[in-house]
Amino acid sequence: MKRLTALSKPLLRFAPEETEAGRKEILGANLGRLIYLLYVGVPLMAAELTFISYKFSGATGQVLQWRTGATTIHFILLIFNLITGAGILFIRKKNLAEKPLVKIIPHFVFIYFITAGIAFTTVDQLITSAITPFVITCLISAMVLIISPFITAIYYTLAYIAFYLAISRMQLPQETLISNLINGFTSIVIGWGLSAILWRNFLQRFRTVALIRQQQSELQIQNKELNHMVNELRQLNTSRSKLFSVISHDLRGPINNLGSILELLKNKSISLSDFEKAIPELTDQAKETSDFLENLLNWSKNNLGGYKNYPELLAINDITTTIIKLYESHSQKKGLKVVNETESWHVAMADPGMVSLIIRNFLANAIKFSKTGGKIVIYSTLRNNELEIGVIDSGIGIDSDRIPLLFTDEQRSTKGTAGETGTGLGLQLCKEFVERNGGRIGVESKKGEGSRFWFTLPEPAKE
């Protein structure tokens, strides 16, 4: 965002980007000050009206004319202060400051005050040559209301013309008239100067507050970015710690077993026939270690930011057929029947590597936790513009208290029905890959009755 320095901004007017917020704040400040018309103006006018009526009750001649004029002006000001103050109180309470007519209230009051000063001064000429009311209203209007000096210059010019015409009609001595006109001109110049100072001070304060708010906003953004970076670093450290923990725990055992058998064979501490008997077990360990390394590699890529989506149109039946063949020896070893019920016409737009890994993990877990002679079904179905793919087994099921942890960091691998081991990373990785492809993942299971693992992919857009 482009930021203008204080030196590059206009001295007595808003810069374009400040106008809307500045006018709103000025209006709020002016309305807040004009509330005192009700709290101060009304009691003051009432007190002066009472004093004039009581003190000059027996007045005659010009004093009577003055008393009548002053009483009338005070009464009008009393009603004006009461209505205006109450109206502003209502406006602030009902949050009506954005209404167009509300925006002109401070200007109307400014003009009204000076007009009242002219009227008071004109009436006062009946008993004195002083122009005190005009001077006071010029100064009070300038000090109370925040209005642009370019606008108040027009108001004061018109006020002086009205003052000149009003005083000139009072048939004052020439010396008194000239003195009053000079003093009146001095009053509007001082009033305009005060108005300009008040406006400039407001602009400076407004810009200072705006700058502080902007800096606070930037600091908040920077803090969020820093917090995000800290969280990423924490996750990275957690991922690395988990990676090393898994490697040390799950990879060391199979390699040590293989190394021990080879050492025995090397030292001729085991016969060739005994070694041949151990080959099936070594083969299973090698396959488990291979699966483990594949999951570990994919998990590391995903958590360390190296895995990217490359979606394409997939035929789900082709993928499941390939995977079933891949695990055919494992399923046959446990006497399991794997049935492919995915539809040949079901397609999805997703990353093929990720989808394959998800289904492989689901099927591997189903084989792992199924009892000998069981049945596993891989299916696909359309639900609410989503393609659901799942694996159902009739295995040992999952404890209800473990189900919420299956797709989290807290998941821990358990041994299968034939003592198979795992990494504990597969389902967590599946969840991350499903979400990367815009789908959902879930599980339904009952202890001793089997499980159903499923995930969804968005149905491809129809041309």
Image: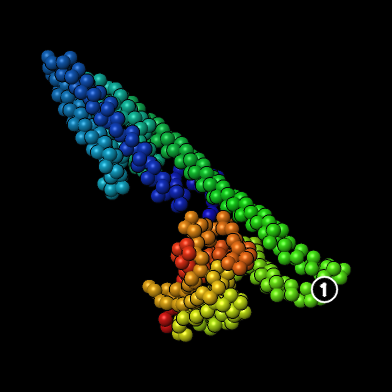
Q: Nearer the viewer, residue 109 or 246?
A: 246
Q: Nearer the viewer, residue 15 or 463?
A: 463
Of all residues, the one furthest to the right in this rendering is 267
Task: Tell me the kind of residue under disc 1.
Answer: Ser
Give the quarter of the figure containing the C terminus: bottom left
Q: Which residue sits at x=51%, y=42%?
A: 212
Residue 143 location in percent, x, y? 38, 32
Rendered position, 368 above or below 48 = below
Residue 100 location in percent, x, y? 28, 49
Rendered position, 153 above or below 380 = above
Quadrant of the rendered image containing residue 413: bottom right
Q: Nearer the viewer, residue 416 or 187?
A: 416
Specify whether residue 154 is in view. Answer: yes
Q: Is residue 209 left or right of residue 309?
A: left
Residue, disc 1: 271
Q: Which residue sits at x=47%, y=74%?
A: 389
Secondary structure, mark 1, is loop
Quadrant of the rendered image containing residue 462: bottom left
Q: How is the image coloured?
A: rainbow
